[in-house]
Amino acid sequence: MLTYDEALALLRGLQVPAQTEELPIEHALGAVLAREVRAGCDQPPFDRATMDGIAVRSCERRVFCVVGSVMAGERFEGALAEDEAVAIMTGAPVPEGCGVVPVEVVERDGELARVDPSWELRPGRNVARRGEDAQEGAAVLLAGARLSVACVAAAAMAGARTVEAWQPPRLGILTTGDEVGAAGPAGIQDSNGPLLAAFATALGLPFERAHAPDDAERMQAVLRGLAERNEIVVTVGGVSMGEKDLVPAAAAMAGYRQLLHRVAIQPGKPLLLAQRDDGRALMGLPGNPVSVLATAHLFLAPLVGRFLGGWEPAWLERPLAVAHAHRGKRRLFLPARLDASGLHPIAWNGSGDLYAAAHGDGLVDLEPGGAWGPGTVLRFLPYLGQGADERALLPRSPRA
């Protein structure tokens, strides 16, 4: 049985059939850059006024004659004398050698402008210099960056109309088990299928879903079809060592070679990783919903990242808000809330307690046998697709 670090290192070493694509900038949100984006021109492209006011050359005078105005998109032709000024708007090109006096400290009387004596005049004040933000040809977004709304805007400002990005792998989601979605007292709701569909959507992955009962022939047929259509197949349940744990054999029949089967973590020990000769991969997750939530973040996301130039979800380091101990023998990735005071590990009823996990913002990494006081800094992995303080507003469990 591999440790978490050993399993992750094995996963990071996988060779996969990754491809790139050219995306219009308007459709690039969430894409991972395969090539850096460089500034097509200096930014700002000219000395730019950072506020409304008057542009002046002199730092000694307090009274100026306003000889014109400069709006955004216009340029003042000529040079200003020491006693002259032009009215200027935010974003407009500043005449050479001038600073900008904000409109709030300027008193206008027709063509005369008087500057408040307490205002400090100095050259270049309230002016963003040409090329100050980025010079032409400079890299403004590096390869490997996952494009946020702000990054898309930055690429557009750099003059990019398209970006070269890693093509997201197709994900085949296979839930298993006679009990999933079945009627009667032994049936259970299918939460894992929607969980993984939402996971795929959060990462911008095309996906398809299927279900296989506890029947070897049927499972082999369904899995084989998913394997042919998708770069990654993720299964749920059926990966342990029970009589109905049919996924490992079905994966082998579909051409997958097993790379690992168990990892010394909690939740999620019975994890399966396999790969075909063509580089396509299969990950078998355990069936308990919190195990699926945890292992999807810990292993499935980095596996997806192998097709995205090595991208992985970012871990944070945050202090504990309360004392906590982990007396178990396996490394624990426990759901936790994060607020201004730090991390609050969530009391749970084991790996089936999805409601408790949904109270959290992510997973805190706890070494076995450890005890930590308030303020101890620990690793924290935020849930994908969830912003700060956007956790579900669920009734609080007595354990939480």
Image: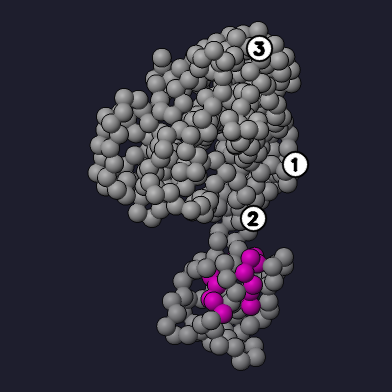
Question: Does 277 lie within the magenta span?
Answer: no
The stretch in magenta equals 86-103
The residue where tag 3 is placed is 216
**Amino acid on which disc 1 is placed:** Pro
Front-most of residues 345 and 91: 345
Front-most of residues 199 and 246: 246
Question: Does 102 lie within the magenta span?
Answer: yes
Q: Report how far apart the C-alphas of labels 2 and 3 lie in the structure.
A: 65 Å
**x and y percent of residue 78 in the render?**
68, 70
Q: Which callout, 2 or 3, points to the residue nearer the camera?
A: 3
**Residue 137, numbered label:** none
Mark 2 and mark 3 lie on one chain; the one further toward the N terminus is: 2
Identity of the residue drawn at 56% across and 23% down: 237
The residue where tag 2 is placed is 45
- Assess disc 1: are there few (<14), some (14-19) or many (≥20) residues with their C-alpha within 10 Å of its C-alpha: few
- Labelled pair 2, 3 in contact (Cβ < 8 Å): no
**Residue 24, numbered label:** 1
Find residue 287 and report its image quarter: top right
264 shown above or below 386? above
**x and y percent of residue 257 in the render?**
58, 9
Mark 1 and mark 3 lie on one chain; the one further toward the N terminus is: 1
- Assess disc 3: are there few (<14), some (14-19) or many (≥20) residues with their C-alpha within 10 Å of its C-alpha: some
Identify the element where label 3 is drawn: helix
Identity of the residue drawn at 60% across and 63% down: 48
Q: Report how far apart the C-alphas of labels 2 and 1 lie in the structure.
A: 24 Å
- Labelled pair 2, 1 in contact (Cβ < 8 Å): no
